[in-house]
Image (cartoon, rainbow, N blue to C red):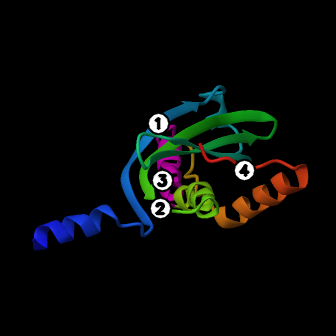
Amino acid sequence: MTDQQTNGAAAEDTSPQFSLQRIYVRDLSFEAPKSPQIFRQQWEPSVALDLNTRQKALEGDFHEVVLTLSVTVKNGDEVAFIAEVQQAGIFLIANLDASSMSHTLGAFCPNILFPYARETLDSLVTRGSFPALMLSPVNFDALYAQEMQRMQEAGEVPTVQ
């Protein structure tokens, strides 16, 4: 009788749930179009970072979140290298209201993925024989709030896929 009560209570659990299931590299690319000439020049780099996130609902309460970091580094007017990583994660997220789910997928999950993406990019760049690329931390909560503000001003409704 005790087992039935315990199983019944677990089946009715409506408390919020979050767990990381897997982190993986979805896509990775590196291009150094001016090699080897670029290595013989004075190194005065300028760095441009493009950051993007997307999410997709999987079966049940599972969600895939993909954080894309694209870095273009120029030395003067020439492109030294272009590196991109799509760092992804599968998350189990259950029993959240729509606003909390949107924030979790749009800010919390990318915040978990960022250190992995940053390390992957740094490793990729050093394997290309360029100086280490140590990206600064990113405030995903602030980026999420800016995007929600932009959507509200544009009259768009955020969707959770």
Tell which tag, 3 or 2, sits nearer the viewer. Answer: 2
Compare marks 3 and 1 and give the one earlier in the sequence: 1
Tell which tag, 4 or 3, sits nearer the viewer. Answer: 4
Mark identifier at residue 68: none
SS for dot 4 = loop
Distance, label 1 to label 4, CA atoms, is 25 Å
How many neighbours does mark 2 have within 10 angstroms: few (below 14), some (14-19), or many (20 or more)?
some
Compare marks 2 and 1 and give the one earlier in the sequence: 1
Q: Is residue 29 visible?
A: yes
Query: Which range of residues does the magenta coloring cover?
Result: 112-129
Distance, label 4 to label 3, CA atoms, is 30 Å
Check disc 2 and report the residue beneath it: 95
**Disc 1, disc 4: CB below 8 Å?**
no
Count of numbered circles on the image: 4
Check disc 1 and report the residue beneath it: 26
- The amino acid type, in three-letter code, at marker 4 is Pro
Q: x%, y% of residue 48? A: 74, 46
Quadrant in the rendering for residue 139: bottom right
Check disc 4 and report the residue beneath it: 158
